Image (cartoon, coloured by chain):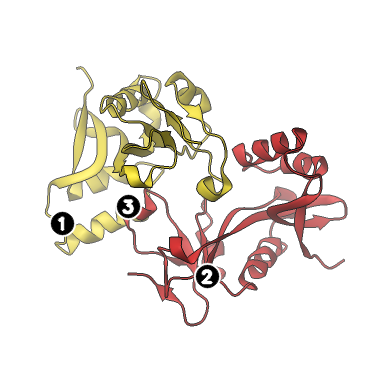
Chain colours: A yellow, B red
Amino acid sequence: MAAKVERLKVNFKTLEEFKKFKEYGIQELSMFEDLEANMVDNDSESPFYGIYYGDKLVARMSLYQIDAKFDRYFYPPQNYLELWKLEVLPDYQSKGYGKLLVEFAKSFGLPIKTNPRVKSSGFWEKMNFKNVEYDMERDRGENPLVWYPEGVEAQH
Amino acid sequence: MAAKVERLKVNFKTLEEFKKFKEYGIQELSMFEDLEANMVDNDSESPFYGIYYGDKLVARMSLYQIDAKFDRYFYPPQNYLELWKLEVLPDYQSKGYGKLLVEFAKSFGLPIKTNPRVKSSGFWEKMNFKNVEYDMERDRGENPLVWYPEGVEAQH
């Protein structure tokens, strides 16, 4: 069975699957509340993409497009993707699922910024992500990593 | 010996002390490079505040004032403090040092936003920090906590 990346739907089943992931926070709680209050439709599109193994969600990430006017990372300034909550469940790690998700994100052809929460620099290096030059006002203690598509470079 | 909070100076001794803290990243590396390249003066002021126990730095945090025009958290919109890298070394925890740092931050009388990296919600609750209402465009998967001084409320 070839693994494939799919956009996750907002529904109670997806939200139940999310509970298995370590990075569970107000984003998930807010999705749950919106669904309960009928503020979003069941099965509407979420910012999450994931990989199922059979019925089970085993990897996920969130992708969100930032408008060029807010771009402080890339030159020339342009729309870019912010990637967060990339996570593969422990029993499914080292099978290439993380790589598959990141390659999916790259396939949009936009620069990507992420802000990894855990020690995972080896992974991101293999994915060809680079450190930025620290800017306190912009980065505020974070350690952003970025991916430059062909023709894009760091903003100075 | 009463513990007191002091503003940390940028010098090689401070940067050596920083290596004991878990949250060490490009901010510290960039301070080190700037000092080596004489781009900042030795003993210039850093955004860090800390508590010494004798000669040893045992707790620290970074504080940075965000201009009202970027405020998306508080009403009325105003200057506020972003607090990050609050950390007490393991042997010095549960002695009130974290509380002392947060009280120091509150003493400026400005609203505070932080984005705790670790499971520490009990601590922040005791410090009277509140969850925000999640806004994907603004919060991007983060779990910000805020402190409202008298007369300040959430921005809607």
User: Residue B117 at what x, y percent from top left?
Assistant: 52, 49
Q: Is residue A43 above or below residue B108?
A: above
Q: Residue at x 65, y 70 (%)?
A: B103
- Element type at marker 3? helix
Rendering quarter of residue A35: bottom left
Left or right: where B45 falls relative to A96: right
Q: Amino acid at mark 3?
A: Glu
On the rendered image, what quadrant is the N terminus of chain B found in?
bottom right
Q: Chain of mark 2?
A: B
Residue at the spot of label 1: A40
Residue at the spot of label 2: B111
Upstream in the sequence, badge 2 or badge 3? Answer: 2
Q: Amino acid at mark 1?
A: Val
- Element type at marker 1? loop
Determine crowd level at label 2: few under 14, some 14-19, many 20+ residues with C-alpha closer than 10 A: many
Residue at the spot of label 3: B137
Left or right: where B151 falls relative to A4: right
